[in-house]
Amino acid sequence: MKARTKIFLFLLLCIICGTTALPLKAQSFDIKAFSDTTKYGWKNYLDRNAYRQDLKQRQDLLQIYEMEAQPLNTNILKSAIIPGWGQFSTKESTKGTVILGTEIVLAGTSFYFLDRALSKYKLYKQATQVDEIEKYYKDAQVPYQYSFILMGAAGIIWAYNIFDVIQSTQDYNVRLWEEIVERSKSGPVYITPTGIEVRF
């Protein structure tokens, strides 16, 4: 064995033996500190029961919230596939319509200019005279540049769409939680994950 290997094994053995030789100290459990209900603000059994009921009600509300909330990743994926779809999911249809319409107009116009540029480029490739070659080449450049500018604008709108759907989803979920809490306070009839509950 090499010297390095022997030193490494010796140190490893010392560490293993040293840790097992150390006395294990367990923390003592103070039952009085644990069961002291005054640290939670509970003065009697009724306070504890009221807290327990409030906690149960909040857990029920949280289950309802989890069933109705919009998942952020799903909305990002929706908006990445079709711009504005995530905004439609978060009940912001005006924003979704504007984003989708703008994206369609920009992409359609970009493809239109690209088609014009390619048709002029085809004429440029077929031309045999120097004047025609220069003319068709210049005629192909302008729509080609417009096409790329419009496609870049469509890309910017698409990126804004992704950013906006993150904000929209978070705002929707905050509004949803507030609405669920308001619904629970509105009357003696409560909707819980297990069904409808009537309290008197």
Image (spheres, rainbow, N blue to C red):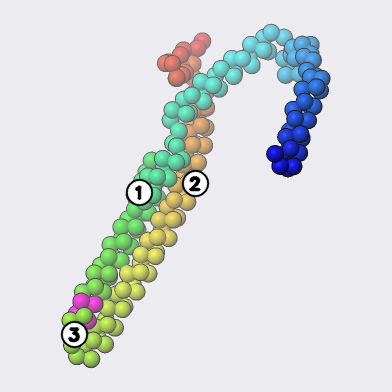
Question: Of marks 3 and 1, which one's residue comes earlier in the chain?
Answer: 1
Tag on residue 81? 1
- Position of residue 185 relative to residue 84, above or below, is above
Which of the pair 195/165 is nearer the observer? 165
Camera-near label (1 vs 2) is 1
Question: Of marks 3 and 2, which one's residue comes earlier in the chain?
Answer: 3
Is the N terminus in the top left, top right, bottom left or bottom right quadrant?
Answer: top right
Separation (CA) of disc 1 from disc 2: 18 Å
Label 3 sits on what residue type? Answer: Ala
Would residue 149 appear left or right of 171 to someone viewing this image? left
Separation (CA) of disc 3 from disc 1: 41 Å
Residue 176 at x, y percent in the picture: 48, 33
Residue 136's image quarter? bottom left
Question: Of marks 1 and 2, which one's residue comes earlier in the chain?
Answer: 1
Label 3 sits on a secondary structure element that is loop
- Position of residue 145 relative to residue 192, above or below, is below
Q: Residue furthest top?
A: 45
Label 1 sits on a secondary structure element that is helix
Label 1 sits on what residue type? Answer: Ile
Residue 131 at x, y percent in the picture: 23, 91
Which residue is painted at 38% across and 40% down in the image? 89
Which residue is painted at 51% across and 25% down in the image? 62
Tag on residue 127? 3
Q: Which residues are magenta?
A: 120-124
Q: Residue at label 2?
A: 167
